[in-house]
Amino acid sequence: MNADAFVYRDNQLFAEDIAVSTLAERFGTPTYVYSRRMLESAYCAFDDAFSAVDHLVCFAVKANSNIGVLNLLARLGSGFDIVSGGELKRVLKAGGSPDKIVFSGVAKSVADIRLALETNILCFNVESGAELERIQQIAAACNRTARISFRVNPDVDAQTHPYISTGLRENKFGVAFEDALALYQRAAAMTHIEIHGIDCHIGSQLTSVSPFVDALQRVLGLVDALRATGIELKHIDIGGGLGVRYRDEIPPTPAEYAHQLLAQLASRNLKVLCEPGRAISANAGIMITRVEYLKDNGDRHFALVDAGMNDQIRPSLYGAWMKLEPVSVRSDVGTAVYDVVGPVCETGDFLGKERELTIAAGDLLVLRDAGAYGFVMASNYNSRGRPAEVIVDGDMAHLVRQREGFDDLIRGEQLLPGHDHG
Ligand SMILES: *Cc1c(COP(=O)(O)O)cnc(C)c1O
C-alpha cells in the first residue's frame, strides 16, 4: 500500500532518491528526515478508506507538528486534531482550515479555549462537566457558539502499552460512559453550546481492529440513547490509535480498519471523523545519527552515537523497539552485538539494545519509523540543541526546521542584575 521510501541501492540507504549519506553531509546529525511520498500516501490511504461515507481525516498534530509536514497534509485537504493553542497556531500557520479542526485534551486552558472559539474551529472534544461549564462561560463572554462532542470513555482494553492506553475507566481521559447522557442533557440546555457529535479514543499503537469495534458498539448504543431523548448527533469521531509496524507487528491497513468500522455504521446518518497520528507519519520518518565511538565494557559492546534520549525518547520512555540500520552496508569490519546508546548522562539513554551490527566508528546509522512521537518529544536535556528536520521529495531535500544552536538554548534566560560578569 505505502511503498517504503527508505531502501538500499547498491548497499547505500536512500531516502526517496537521495542517499542518506548526502543528507547527513548537508544537514549534519542527528537529523529527522520525512518522505513526502510516504506521508501523502498514508494520508490518502485513510481518506480513500472512508470514501464511501461523508468523512474527515483529522491528523493528530501531536504525532508530528512540524509546519512543513502539516502544510503537506493541509494541501491534501486534511483536517487536524489539536491538543493545545500552540498546535492550533501551527495548523493555521501551515494553511489548515479552521472548519476542519477538532480540539482534544483533558485540561484545556481558558486562553486556548478562547483562541479556538475566535478561530471558529469545527468542534471541541469535551472531557468533563467542568470543562463544559468553562467553554459555555467563555463562549458567552465572547458571544460565540461552541460546537461540542463529548469524549466518552468506553472502558475497553486496547491491549497496548499501559502508557498509551486511554480507554479504560482507570485512565484520566474522557467522561465516564454512564455519565454521558446526563452531560449531553446539561449541554443541550446551555445557551452558547451546540451539540455536534460524540468522540472516543481508546489508545495508541493498536494492532487489531476488535477493540475499535467494541468501543464503537458501545458508543453507538449511546448515540441511540441520545436520540431517544431528542438529541440528534451530526458526527461520530472514532479517534486515532491504529498501529504501525516497528518490528514484526502486522497491524490492519487503514482499508481493513475502515471496512470493519463502516460495517457497524451502515445506515446511520453520521459523518465519520477519525484522528490518526502514528499511522500517517511514523513509517514516513527516520532519524540519522552518527557513531561517535565503539567501546567494550567487559563482554558488553557499546556503540555510542550522537543522538540521545533528548532527541528520541520512545525507547527510553516506553521500552519501544525501533529498527536501527546502517547507512552503508560494509563487510570490511567485524560484526558484533551492540547496545546503541546516546551521549546523555542517564542509564536509560539508549536507542536500541543487543543489535547485531557491522559498523565502525564514524559510520552513520538510521533509526527507522521515527516520524511520529519523535522530534515532537525532543527536549534540550543536557543543553543539547534539538535536531534538524528535513522533508525529502524525490531527489530534493528541504530543511523544514534548522538545528538548534546555543542562542536557541538560552532564549528567554537572563542573568540577575547588579553584578559584573565576564
Ligand atoms: C494521541 C491521540 C490521537 C492519535 O493517536 P495515534 O495513536 O497517533 O493515532 C488521536 N486522538 C487523540 C484524542 C489523541 O490523544
Image: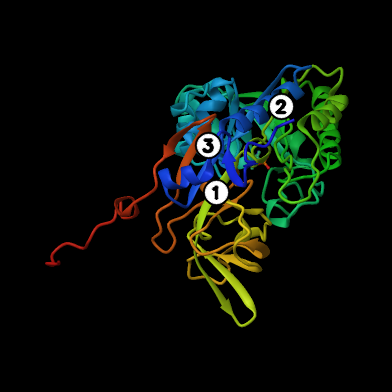
Tell me where residue 47 appears, x and y as whole percent: 70, 23
- Counting the numbered discs, the total is 3
x, y percent for residue 284: 62, 38
Gap between marks 1 and 3 measured at Cα: 15 Å
Residue at x 52%, y 47% (from the top left corner): 375
Q: Residue at x 60, y 43 (%)?
A: 372
> How far is mark 3 from mark 2, CA to CA?
25 Å
**In the rendered view of the protein, which quadrant contains the N terminus?**
top right
Pick whichever, 176 or 303, lies toward us: 303
**Residue at x-position 78% and y-position 20%:** 230
- To which residue does mark 1 refer? 287
| Up-down relation of residue 228 to residue 357 (above or below) | above
**Residue bearing the label numbered 2:** 45
**Foreground label between 2 and 1:** 1
Label 1 neighbour load within 10 Å: few <14, some 14-19, many 20+: many
Label placed on residue 18: 3
Q: Is residue 307 visible?
A: yes
**Disc number lying in front (3 or 2):** 3
Residue at mark 1: C-beta within 8 A of ligand 1: no
* Quadrant in which the C terminus appears: bottom left
> Can you say whether 405 is above or below 396 in the image?
below
Crowd around label 2: few <14 · some 14–19 · many ≥20 (10 Å): some
Residue 207, label in figure: none
- Residue at horizontal 72%, vertical 46%? 203
Which quadrant of the frame does ligand 1 lie within?
top right
Residue type at mark 3 is Ile
In depth, the one of 200 and 66 nearer the eye is 66
* Residue 384 occupies quadrant: bottom left
